[in-house]
Amino acid sequence: MPTSLARRRAIIVGAGQSGLAVAAALSAEGLRPQQDFVVIDAAAPGHRSWSSRWHSMVLLSDARHSALPTRRYPGDQRSHPRVDEMVDYLKVVEASIGVETAWGVRVTGAERRGDGSTLHLSTTAGEVQTRNIVCATGAAAHPRLPEWASALTVPGVAIHSSSYQYPRQIPTPDVLVIGGGNSGLQIARELAASHTVTMAVRTRRAHRPLASYPLAAGGRRPLFGGDLRPEPVFGDSYERLQQAGVRIAPAVAGVHIATAVTHARGGAVTFEDGTTASPGSVIFATGYLPGDDWLPDEARIRGTRRTTTPVPGLFVAGFPQYSRRGVDTIAGVSADATAIAHHIINRP
């Protein structure tokens, strides 16, 4: 058992915005970082998820809505922070709370044994016992790819948006961006200045002004029931992209394996309208899977209260499916953090 993690009242798994929000809430309740609770993260030191986003990315929320309650975002409150600025901001938050994150510690499982109040957390540093565990590993933690992605070969690159950094990374003159959400629009907009861009869109999303993001972020269910509606696109729109030269195509249905005619291009994709294309490069802006894969099966059942699970002492922060719409945003996660802190303080 790693001595730095042992005998703590709570262990927060994840040092991103959700984990730091919970740490700040616990500190406000009088718990001491490193003594009463610890924060662990699987990444290399300081390498939060924001660090891997493309260089020109800016947040959809302005500075007022891109900060945790414990620390005001510096500078012009109407500006939209870049990802490198957000990384720096979270470092300042971490230092202001007094948290010393245990980096490079990956969690592999958690369980409750018997009827006691102790939880067992399995990590790459060993097994740890604690009374409370907070899953703050992110609602968008793992790249999501379509099933047919591995069958696609292109002469250039085929990468998920999480691996995209800048236009020079795309070696071919043309590129297919798969996915019509906000990430797809931002990447297509940047590449349109230097590449011939096609963007495959399954469902055209509603367009909202950028200023409405804090209230309109996330998917919604219709008032009288029905399927979840995808998050709107903010600021930019499909029409503006078309004016910039981006071709909007239907969703990709699958891969057409290369023939002698298309072999030089490495194969082709088939769109839902039956047409095909042989892209030079592909960027999958197809979203992410949540980082709750290490939770036990019984914890995945929605708890009776937000942020809780059926496993006593096991909490989840920043996941809309365990709470409500918007908690996966920087401003929205504070409600989860406050609720979890109260649960931990009041646990017998």
Image (tube, grey):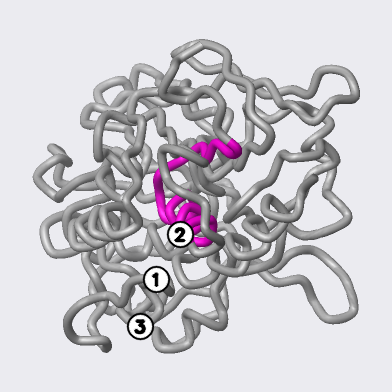
Discs 3/1, front = 1
Secondary structure of the residue carrying numbered label 3: helix
Secondary structure found at label 1: loop
Residue marked by disc 2:
24
Q: Sequence-wise, which precedes: disc 3 or disc 1?
A: 3
| Total residue callouts | 3
Residue receiving disc 1 = 70
Q: Which residue is mark 3?
A: 64
Q: CB of mark 1 within 8 Å of CB of mark 2?
A: yes
Q: Residue at x 85, y 40 (%)?
A: 310
Instruction: Give coordinates of residue 240: x percent, y percent.
Output: 33, 80
Foreground residue among 116 and 157? 116
Q: CA distance from mark 3 to mark 2?
A: 18 Å
* Range of magenta residues: 9-27
Amino acid beneath label 3: Arg
Which residue corresponds to the image point at 23% horizontal and 27% vertical from the top-left? 155
Between marks 3 and 2 in the image, the one whose residue lies nearer the viewer:
2
State the CA–CA distance, disc 3 to disc 1. Answer: 13 Å
Question: Which label's residue is closer to the chain start, 1 or 2?
Answer: 2
Position of 23 with respect to 216 (left or right) is left
Instruction: Inspect the image, locate mark 1, and give the three-letter code of the amino acid beneath it.
Output: Thr
Report x, y in % for residue 32. 45, 48
